[in-house]
Image (spheres, grey):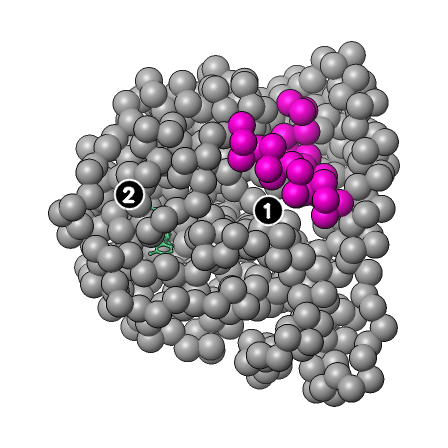
Amino acid sequence: MCYAIPGKIKRIEGKKVVVDYFGEEKRALNEFHQLKVGDYVSAQGGFVIKKVEPQDAKDTLVAWKELFFELQEIDLQLSRLKPKDKKLNKDLSRILDKALEGYQLKKEELLYLLEREKPDELNMLYASANFLRQKYHKNSCCIHGIIEISNHCSKSCQYCGITLTNQRLKRYRMSPEEIVSAACEAVEKYGFQALVLQSGEDPVYKVEDLATIIGNIKKKVPVLICVSFGEVGLDGLEKLYQSGARALLMRFETSNPELFKKLHPGQTLDSRLAHLRRAQELGYIIISGGLIGLPGQTKEDLINDILLAKDLRTEMYSFGPFLAHPETPLADSPKLSENEVLKVLALARLIDPEKAKILVTTAFETLSLRARKTGLSAGANSVMLNVTPETYRKKYDIYPDKVYSETSLKAQITETIDLLKSLGRAPTDLGVSQ
Ligand code: SAH
């Protein structure tokens, strides 16, 4: 659940509260607050983030109500399926109908979809994914912020621009005070309610330091913290959870163990998966996925990637294109087309229609300036904005020419909200501050 619009508690079921959002019921876990039926709360990722004063809540809801229903109507129109073109490939038609009726597709059917190239066939695939997104998720769109706290890294992932072996990169490390202050500003000034803290595997920041930083943020502002520091160890995950982190962003990158090994010297897929499984047990929200278009990756690998994400009970799917970085061993790799990414997003929606939140990644937005619009119209329903202080943003150089590196946060927010409104999506995460 990603509604930051306040909702009213209808019932309390043990540790969970049932919250009403314009007639829709959502459940959220309450860990920190004294709550009773009739209180207003805002929630993120299934966790109650804060109690909201009744008058403030009512004011926000009045301001939102009309727009909310207006947006829902636009979305409904845009996601309606058009009558099928009679000339359309019969196999494709049959597979899409099967998915639309709620059946799981077989691997060979998924592969068939991934192999489509013709524009009218691809449009049908995207429209079906968009239909399923609307059916199960309505028009809500998660907007999370990401703060890239350090580009130091002790690992040498072959595709990544902040790899240990990139001698040319100017390294930076935000101080704990800078991190806390950037997080507070994102919440208090810009209305974010969910923030990802990300870095390379920085040997200087120990888990204990990161836990203290998270604890300090949580003391100051109500926010869902998602951690993305790489492999911090299974105990490390527990410490970060105890300090208040509630989501983990960790891609498994590829589900193919051999390919994983090749691309990550000294690392194993098993260890990455052990982290993801332990995080799930601890109660973290899982954000995971992989890279699309890695050298040596097959279409079967990509299908297995999406299936693995589902198996890991991933709440938010993060699949983005691999973009070759000049200072890495994979510098000469070819550029991917927009459709290769869209197909994966659409398939993720078909494979996990009801539960998946699907992210339009910044890498995809770097590959194509239309990515947000096309991605959100092909099954995706989440975006991430870059909240890293502008002085550091360019240095978090995982791939070249990262989009929004020089766009102020305010401009990013305005642009995002305008786009979401044009698509009939409710930018519910930032709604309160607008
Ligand atoms: N240390 C953290 C964060 C790594 S960087 C971790 O290990 O999880 C965040 C993500 O950037 C990676 O998971 C990877 O999928 C992506 N990434 C790295 N290099 C990339 C490239 N060249 N193109 C696209 N995405 C890249």
Magenta-highlighted residues: 410-434
Residue at 78% over, 55% down: 78
Residue that mark 2 sits on:
200
Residue at 57% over, 54% down: 370
At label 1, the amino acid type is Ser
Q: Position of residue 221 (x, y in %)?
A: 51, 18
State the SS at label 2: loop
In which quadrant will I find the C terminus?
top right
Q: Nearer the viewer, residue 11 or 82?
A: 82
Taken as a whole, is the magenta stretch helix, strand or loop?
A: helix
Q: Nearer the viewer, residue 220 or 291?
A: 291
At label 2, the amino acid type is Gly
- Residue 413 lies left or right of residue 148; in this view the side is right
Q: Position of residue 206 (x, y in %)?
A: 24, 32
Q: Which mark is residue 382?
A: 1
- Where residue 234 sits, quadrant-wise, is top left
Tell me which numbered mark, 1 or 2, is placed earlier along the sequence.
Answer: 2
- Would residue 241 be seen by someone viewing this image from the given angle? no
